[in-house]
Amino acid sequence: MTKTSVWRGFASDNYAGVDTEVIKRMVLVNQGHEVAYGDDTVTAEFNKLVKQLFGSKAVGFPVFNGTGANVVALQAGLKRWEAVICVESAHIHADEGGAPEKMGGIKLWTVPSPNGKLTPELIDTQVFDMGFVHRAQPGIVSITQTTEMGTLYTAKEIKAVADRAHKHGLLIHMDGARLSNAAAALGLSFKQFTTDLGIDLVSLGATKIGALAAEAVIVTDAKSARGKELANAMPFLRKTSMQLPSKMRFVSAQLLALFENDARVALANARHANAMAKRLYEGVLQISRKHKEVKVPNPTEANAVFPILPAKVTAKLQKDYRFYVWNQATGQVRWMCAWDTTTSDVDGLLEALKKALK
């Protein structure tokens, strides 16, 4: 067996390993045969869990990954001539390799937002020429919670965006790649800041919080006329989008391990990641008081820190730590804390930053 060195960085929470609870559950369901493609007892158990987490009218559809969840969800909610309104920094626009466009044939109408959040006013800027055949018609508003800029929508902000979307006759989708981090930061259940506030579709993230390869698309109200359409379309779109796991019990098992018992494992992992980011943020903030070339423009609201560093300092740090430069022009970098980040990891990066500044 090849021995690999153990290391942890700050590039992405996707770099982290798999929670042992997830591995245990996958081993547990690896007994005998089960019906393929989702007609298994494990997936049935997950479907019951979805109703506990998102409300009695919710249904869930396990998929392989986050991009797949987003593409399937958006396709389900759009007619062929419709488009999505999102911010420029949205994952569906900036980090999915054009998958919504290429796989779904979806037009994205983007708006600039320095903090990564959509507002009712920003939505309004893209709702015009309705009925004009030469313009792709908005059909869905998509927001990310937490955002790609590390910011967190409050419940009040989500409600305002959802209400404005519905006022225009649009559906609202939440990319919840870090939904657990948001829940931990807000101190709310998933239902309280999704279903209860009018969110129609959720991409439920699990990989970043300890899964191996598991996400799900949630239709929050499959009993309404529009919700029924979404739920009925989902199985077919999941298949044609190459997101239908044949041995779905192993995907569902991961989701159960993280989200059963009121999302006990997922929330514990999220709280830890958020706490590590707060520790890192406070450490950088302290360093910035002595070194004015280091700036921390935004507070840390979940598990991401976005400091601005001199290019030479960044280059020195990247010799020992993996992380991304987020904005080449300003020198802003992104440090992500994961469910398995340790205080030693954080303190080590802070010490390395102090050294690089000398």
Image (cartoon, grey):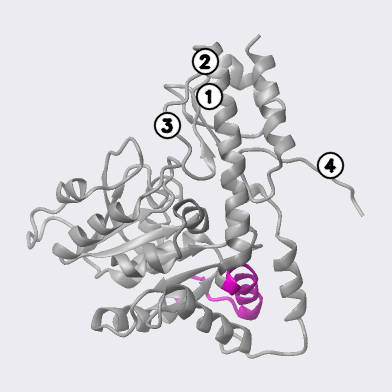
The Cα–Cα distance between marks 2 and 1, rounded to whole angstroms, is 7 Å
**Segment colored magenta:** 240-261
Which amino acid is tagged 3?
Asn
Q: Which mark is residue 289?
A: 2
Which amino acid is tagged 2?
Arg
Mark in front: 3 vs 4: 3
The Cα–Cα distance between marks 2 and 3, rounded to whole angstroms, is 15 Å
* Residues marked 2 and 3 touching at CB (< 8 Å): no
Q: Residue tagged by mark 4? A: 5
Give the crowd class for mark 2: few <14, some 14-19, many >=20 residues within 10 Å: few
Give the crowd class for mark 1: few <14, some 14-19, many >=20 residues within 10 Å: some
Which amino acid is tagged 1?
Leu
Which residue shows up at 66% across the image and 19% down it? 316
Near-viewer residue (268 or 308): 268
Tell me which corner region of the image, top left, top right, bottom left or bottom right, holds residue 6. Answer: top right
> In the rendered view, does 229 fall on the left or right side of 247?
left
Of the image marks 2 and 3, the number of the one nearer the N terminus: 2
Near-viewer residue (156 or 115): 156
Mark in front: 1 vs 4: 1
Which residue shows up at 17% across the image and 46% down it? 121
Q: Residue tagged by mark 3? A: 298
